[in-house]
Image: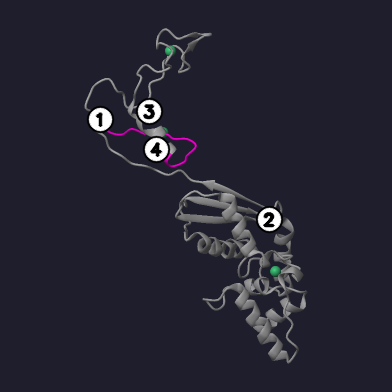
Amino acid sequence: MDFPAAARAVIDAGPVCDSCLGRVFADRSFGLSNADRGEGLRTAVAIADDEPYEGVAPADCWVCDGACGRFDEWAERAVDALGDPEFDTYQVGTRTPPLIEENDRLLREDAGLPDDAGELFKSNFNREVGKRIGRLTDTEVEFGRPDVQFTLDLDAGRVDTKLNSAFVYGRYRKLERGIPQTEWPCRECHGSGLQGSRPCEHCDGEGYLYPESVEELTAPIVEDVMGGTAATFHGAGRE
Ligand SMILES: [Zn+2]
Ligand SMILES: [Zn+2]
Ligand SMILES: [Zn+2]
């Protein structure tokens, strides 16, 4: 099937929104959103056939069932779900409902195209919602190790957020003896400070053999200042 015929076949197979129509031909013409591409294809086919132009709203789309009309809504939901931590980079993933995945396959079958022609629903959804999250929060997409990972669960109507750890590097000079680098839990009471119900004699009920350590003097403070939930201290080098 040649190209305009393939677009026509997709249009004729059922009401399909501009994004879903455009996705099938996503490898044509760089620099367009799939919605722009779909609208253009629909226009071109209507003119070629001299038929009245009829747009299809996402809510009427048999493939995405309205999902492609809710990019803004999902971006706002993602930002709300995150709360208020500072971040610079993010990545978006989508849990696609099985019905949409199946429709995505049928959509291409109608046009006699391979299963994975163009761009799948999931990639388009990730990108369109991602662009909007970036605009709302003035942050950027990163695929390596983003500060924040958003997972859009379409069926559940929920956004899961995962904050990756922040790394803080520092150096110190130790000017007196008797302060170990890492916390040194008492081996008699395993750090609990108790032997049965009585204070541990070995550590005087402290749970630690030294009242202070570099770890104990730094990690909780960094955790507190950054609004974290846990901190892990890694020492390097010799004192
Ligand atoms: Zn659609
Ligand atoms: Zn002890
Ligand atoms: Zn470690």
Give the mark nearest the N terminus, 1 or 3.
3
**Gap in angstroms between the C-alphas marked 1 and 2:** 51 Å
How busy is the neighbourhood of tag 1: few (under 14 within 10 Å), some, or many (20 plus)? few
The quadrant holding residue 42 is bottom right
Asked if residue 144 lies in the magenta stretch, the reply is no
Give the magenta part as a residue range: 225-238
Q: Disc number at residue 222? A: 4
The quadrant holding residue 28 is bottom right
203, 184: nearer the viewer: 203
Give the mark nearest the N terminus, 1 or 2.
2
Q: Disc number at residue 154? A: 2
The residue tagged 3 is 216
Q: Does residue 170 lie above or below 135 as drawn?
A: above
Amino acid carrying mark 1 in the image: Arg
The residue tagged 1 is 238
Amino acid carrying mark 2 in the image: Leu
